[in-house]
Image (spheres, coloured by chain):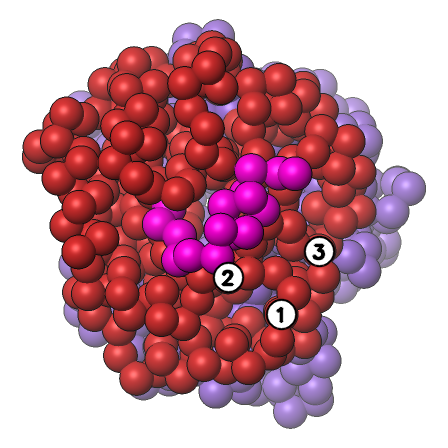
Chain colours: A purple, B red
Amino acid sequence: MQYNVDEKGYYGDFGGAFIPEMLYPNVEELQKNYKTLTADPAFQKEFQQLLRDYVGRPTPLYFASRLSEKYQTKIYLKREDLCHTGAHKVNNTIGQILLAKKLGKNRIIAETGAGQHGVATATVCALMGISCVVYMGELDIQRQAPNVARMKMLGAEVRPAQSGSKTLKDATNEAIRDWINNPVDTHYIIGSVVGPHPYPDMVARFQSVISAETKSQLLACEGRDYPDHVIACVGGGSNAAGLYYHYLNDTRVNIIAVEAAGKGIDSGASAATSALGREGIIHGSKTLLMQTEDGQITEPYSISAGLDYPGVGPMHAHLYRSKRAEFISIPDQEAMDWGLTLSQMEGIIPAIETAHAFAVLDARKFNPDDIIVFNCSGRGDKDLNTYIDYFKL
Amino acid sequence: MNRIDKAFAQGKKLLSIYFSAGHPQLDDTLPILQQLQASGVDMIEIGLPFSDPLADGPTIQESATQALRNGMTTHKLFEQLQEVRQHIELPLIIMGYFNPMLQYGMEAFCERCAEVGIDGLIIPDLPIDVFEKEYKALFDKHGLYAIFLITPQTSDERIHYIDALSQGFIYMVSSASVTGAKNDFGAAQTDYFNRIAALGLQTPQIVGFGISNAATYQAATQHAQGAIIGSAFIKFLEEKGVAQIPEFIQQIKN
C-alpha cells in the first residue's frame, strides 16, 4: 500500500481537486509547478536558511523523563512549540510565501480558526513585505482577541467571515471566494493538509521537516532513526502529517492520530471526524467529513479552536480507511487535564490541541521499551484565557 | 429533443432565471416556476441549496442558508418537482454542489432528475475530467445535459475541451468573480466576450454572474445567446414576493 499522494493528487480514495472552474487556472499553476519550484536548490537554500535562522530549527527532540517514568515507557517530545510564533504552522507559511514569490504573486490571503495560522501567515508577509488578508470567523475573532491583535500588529488585515456558522469553515469559504475574485495577483496560503490537490501534499512536504529532524535526532540518542509510535493531534492534520511523513511507508512505526471528541462522540458536540464522518467533498477535496444525511456540512465542536474542523486532510482519511493509523478521540476534559499535567510534570504549557495527543497515554498501553515520539505542536500562551476560565486560575 | 436545445432552436436571445429552492418559503418552488413561465422567461435554474456554496456570493449563500433552515433537502425538492411537468414546459436545470448529490447517490440523483423531467445539471465543483471519466455515461443514460462554466481566465485550449464535452450551453462567467449583481460591464469583459465569440464554439453560450438589470442583460446578450440572472432576482423575491415576479421580468426585458 502506498501512503503518499499519487500523480493525480489522490491518497487511495481521497483527495483530488473538486473546485469551481474559476479556480482552475490558479490550482493548475500550483499543480504544475510546486514540485519543481520547491525542489530548486536556490529555493531549498533560502527555505532551510529561514527555518534555521528565523524559525529556530531544528527544534529539540526532548526526552521527557518524568512522564516516561510515570508511564513506564520512553517518551520523546518533538518541540514544535518552540518555533517562532509558537507552533509548527510557520514551517508551512515560510515555504508557501517563498513559493508565492516565485509565482510572482504580490498579495496573500489565508484562513484561520484559532489564529495560529493567521499569525504565522501575517508574520511571513511582514518578513517579505507582501500585503496580507486573513479571513477569520466572526465568532473566532471574539474568542481569540490576542491573536487578532498580533495579526494587526504584523500589518495584516483581518476580515471577519460573517456567513454560515462564522467559524473556520466559513473563513475558508471566504478565502476561497477572495481567490476566485482575485485570480491573478493573489496566492492563497492554506494552513493545513486540506483543500484541493496539491495543497495537502504541498503543506505535508513543508511540514515534513518535523519527521526529517526526528529521524536524525533519534538516531543520535537511540541508535535507530525510527520510533515505535508517532502520536499527534489531528484537526485538518498538518502537524500530524509533518510527524508521520517520513514514516508513512515504514511499517515498523505505529501511527496514532488523536482527534477531538469535544463533549463526547455521541453528544452532538464533537470534532471526531473519523468516527462521525462520511466520505464527501469539503473545500475542494474528497475526504471524510461530518455532514447531515442530506450532504450539508455540519458544525463541529471542540474546546480547542484548532481541532474544530468538520473534515480531515485526505492523507489522514486514507490512513484511517486503510488502517495504517490508529485513530483515538479524546474529550475536552481529558485534554484540559493533560494541559495541566504536562505543565506540572515537564514544565511545558501546551496548546489545548497538543494536549489532546498526550491523553493517549491514559487511553492505551505501551511497552516499557517502546520509543514514542509526540508532536508537541504548539504552546499554550494563546489558550491562557481558556485555561484560566476552565481551572479558575 | 432536449428542451434546452428546443429553446435555443427558436433563434432568439434567452433569459434564464436562477433561484434557490426552498427560499423565501419552503413551498415556493412550484409557484415561482409558474410565475416565471407566465412572465415569459425561457429557461430556469433551480438551485439545490448547500451549506458551503464556494462559488456563490452573499445573496445566493444567504438564500441557500434560509432554504436549509426552512427544511429544504434533496428529497424534498424532488417531491416538489414530482408533477412539475404537468405545469411547466420550460427547460429546467438543477444547479447544485457536488456533495449533496454524492450523498443522495449520483445514480439515484440522475434517475430522479430524469423521472421528474429535469433537462440538465450544473455542478460547479465537479471537475470536467472527473465528469468525463466517472459520470458522463450516467448523464447520457438519463438524457441529462451537463453544463460547464468558463471564465475570463480559462485558456482557449481548455475552452475547446469544455466545448467538446458540453451539451445544451456553456455557462460563460462574466468576470473573475463569485455570483452577485453588478451594474455594468467594462472593457475587459467585452474583450473576453469577443474572444469567446471568435473561437467558433459548437455549443451556444449564456452569460451569467453580474447581470442585474435591463442594461447588463442587453450588453450580455449582444455577445451571447442568452443571459442568466440569479442574485438580483433573489433580492427582488425577498423584497417584493413571488406574486410580483412578472414586474421583475418585464423590467429586464425592456
B48 sits left or right of B232 in the view:
right
Toward the bottom, the furthest residue is A42
Quadrant housing residue A163:
top left
Does any portion of residue A167 appear in the rendered image? no
Could you say whether the residue bearing mark 1 is in a helix, strand or loop? loop
Mark 3 or 1: the one toward you = 1
Disc ID at residue B205: 2
Mark 2 or 3: the one toward you = 2
Q: Is A160 located above or below residue B39 in the figure?
A: below
Stretch in magenta: B1-16
Q: Is B14 located above or below residue A253 in the figure?
A: below
**Measured from the top left, where is residue A388 in percent x and y?**
20, 31
Query: Going from the N terminus, do you reach mark 3 or mark 1 first?
Result: 3
Instruction: Measure the alpha-carbon separation of dots 2 and 3.
Output: 14 Å
Amino acid bearing label 3: Leu
Instruction: Measure the alpha-carbon separation of dots 1 and 2.
Output: 9 Å
* Mark 1–mark 2 CB contact (< 8 Å): yes
**Measured from the top left, where is residue A169 in percent x and y?**
39, 41
Foreground residue among B24 and A83: B24
What residue is pinned by disc 3? B165
Disc ID at residue B201: 1
Residue at image position (55%, 61%) is B204
Amino acid bearing label 2: Gln
